Amino acid sequence: MRIALGCDHGGLEHKNAILNHLKDRDFEVFDFGIYELESVDYPKIALKVANSVAQGECELGILVCGTGIGMSLAANKVKGIRAAACSEHFSAKFTRLHNNSNILCLGGRVIGIGTALELVDLFVDTEFEGGRHQRRVDMISEIENEGEL
Ligand code: RB5
């Protein structure tokens, strides 16, 4: 599986740990930066990762900023993206199972690196359940495409 990864200055340490972790697990990782500690505007990184996933270059994405929230707001503006900001295990698993989320957003100032790696594992290892959840995910796409249901 190919995974797109990105962060701002609030998530660099976490991003680097996630990069190493995913590589150790033999995932193909596309690292969209940042690579050194510098202040950046998180929407720029969110757009790169979201485009990579929306265009099919990568199957899933992971974004880290201070809270995970700014990244999720920005990524969700890209058509086809379902980005979820998660800080605990249940949500990281169920946003794959029920929402078919394709980007996980984490807060480098909210959770420690150990928890972040556990949430990443749950996210990448969980398959969408489909069934009744497919209808609901389709409705999200309909809102995105038509602006109504
Ligand atoms: C940057 O200071 C911070 O605002 C950003 O990392 C993120 O938390 C935004 O949602």
Image (cartoon, helix red, strand yellow):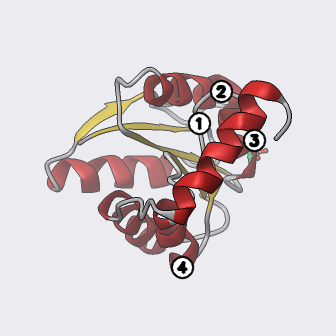
| Amino acid on which disc 2 is placed | Val
From the viewer's perspective, is the residue at label 2 or at label 3 nearer?
A: 2
Looking at the rendered structure, which numbered label has been put on residue 73?
3
| Amino acid on which disc 1 is placed | Ile
| Amino acid on which disc 3 is placed | Leu
Q: Residues within 10 Å of mark 1 (few under 14, many from 20)?
A: many
Q: Quadrant of residue 40?
A: top right
Which sits earlier in the primary sequence, circle 1 or circle 3?
Answer: 3
**Relative height, residue 16 to residue 98 (above, below):** above
Q: Is residue 30 left or right of residue 78?
A: left
Task: Tell me if the residue at label 1 has its CB under 8 Å from ligand 1.
Answer: no
Q: Are marks 2 and 1 in contact (CB under 8 Å)?
A: yes
Residue that badge 4 annotates = 90
Looking at the rendered structure, which numbered label has been put on residue 81?
1
Residue at (57, 58) in percent of width and height: 99
The answer for how far apart the CA atoms under marks 4 and 2 are is 25 Å
Q: Secondary structure at mark 2?
A: loop
Give x and y (percent) for residue 23: 20, 47
The answer for how far apart the CA atoms under marks 1 and 3 are is 11 Å
